[in-house]
Image (cartoon, rainbow, N blue to C red):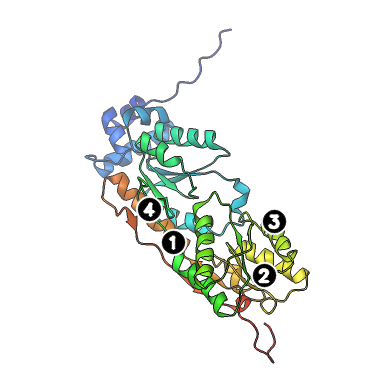
Amino acid sequence: MSESPRAKRPTISDVAARAGVSKGAVSRALNGGQGISEPTIARIRAAALELNWTPSATARAVSGAASHAIGLVLRRPAELLEDDPFFPAFIAGVEGVLSRAGYAAVLRFVSDTTTERDAYTQLFGERRVDGFLLTDLRQRDQRFDWLQAMGAPAIVAGTPPKGCPFPSVGTGSAPAVRELVQHLLDDGHTRIAHVSGPSTLRHARRRTQIWSDTIRAAGLEPGPLVDGEFSADGSVRATEELLALPEPPTAIFYANDIMAIAGMSVLAEHGYRVPDDIAVAGFDDVSLASYVVPSLTTVHCDYRTMGRRATQMLLAVIRGDEVPHVAPGIGAQLRVRRSSTRTPKGSSSN
């Protein structure tokens, strides 16, 4: 008995025949609908659905058709997003714009430089995405060269180095960080430590630089400085290291709130009172910041707005519209709470 032939995959010609239109009309209907009436588009989509037909990535690449998707490639373990204060809010802003525009987001996690470059090449080369959002900027960021060589549209979410070929939108948080460190100085602290993020990331180095410059401007030497890796575990190790010094700091500025909250638990375990023995401040203003005891002094950033603006800019670039090369920052505000304000004598700590 002969084998039954494999079921033939439906083609664009089959969809055109079912809908009673040309192949060109099918292509235009599924890529913007220019010059096609709404009833005809509905008939073509119904035919495609009945035949279970979708255009292949290869066909899109050959035709140059828009994918109606944008890419976000993250070189970090996916599990780190669970406690990350930036990405959930940022992605919410991104999705809010994409859903209204009929676009989708393609999220790809990579582990090293090779897989990262391959991801960008595949996503754009096969027309799976029309452009990219770039986050987690590094000191020497090869992505700028890769995407420029491919001709891929991109928007930088963050503060890039001079000469960046792509438009950007940042937080504009520098003045608020400076104000936070000055707040600690004004409260009489002279040994203000900083638990930083990885020095390979531009935003981590920028916060460290502002901390250092503000303290030097007050005529003091900055320090000590310890890398907390932007994680709770890293903060625990960093805080233990600070407390083991012959002269522990009287204030600690953590580069994000997750590290600050983890650090406060270490201080409590060692018998230190916050803020009377050691003042604590963070960055991000996560939802728990105002509920921990004592409530956490921090810098508030509206990452949802950042995601929304970056996505609006990217879709404009994809359309061929002009956008500012450096958009105004979203702004940030210092939120002074109990963790950095010493209890007046005769009062009890909250």
Circle 3 SS class: helix
Residue that carries the numbered disc 1 in the rendered image: 171
Q: CA distance from mark 2 to mark 4?
A: 37 Å
Between the residue at mark 2 and the residue at mark 3, the CA separation in whole angstroms equals 20 Å
Q: Position of residue 170 (x, y in %)?
A: 42, 58
Q: Residue furthest right?
A: 270
> Quick one: quadrant of the C terminus?
bottom right
Going by the numbered disc 3, the residue's amino acid type is Asp
Q: Which residue appears at 39% of the width and 62% of the height?
A: 329
Residue pushed farthest front? 219
- The residue at 62%/54% (across/down) is 229
Amino acid residing under circle 1:
Thr
Disc number for residue 249: 2
Q: 10 and 161: which one is in front? A: 161
The answer to the question of whether label 4 and label 1 lie on touching residues, with beta carbons closer than 8 A, is no
Label 4 residue SS = strand
Tell me the CA gap for discs 2 and 1.
29 Å
Image quadrant holding the N terminus, namely top right
**Mark 2 or 1, closer to the camera:** 2
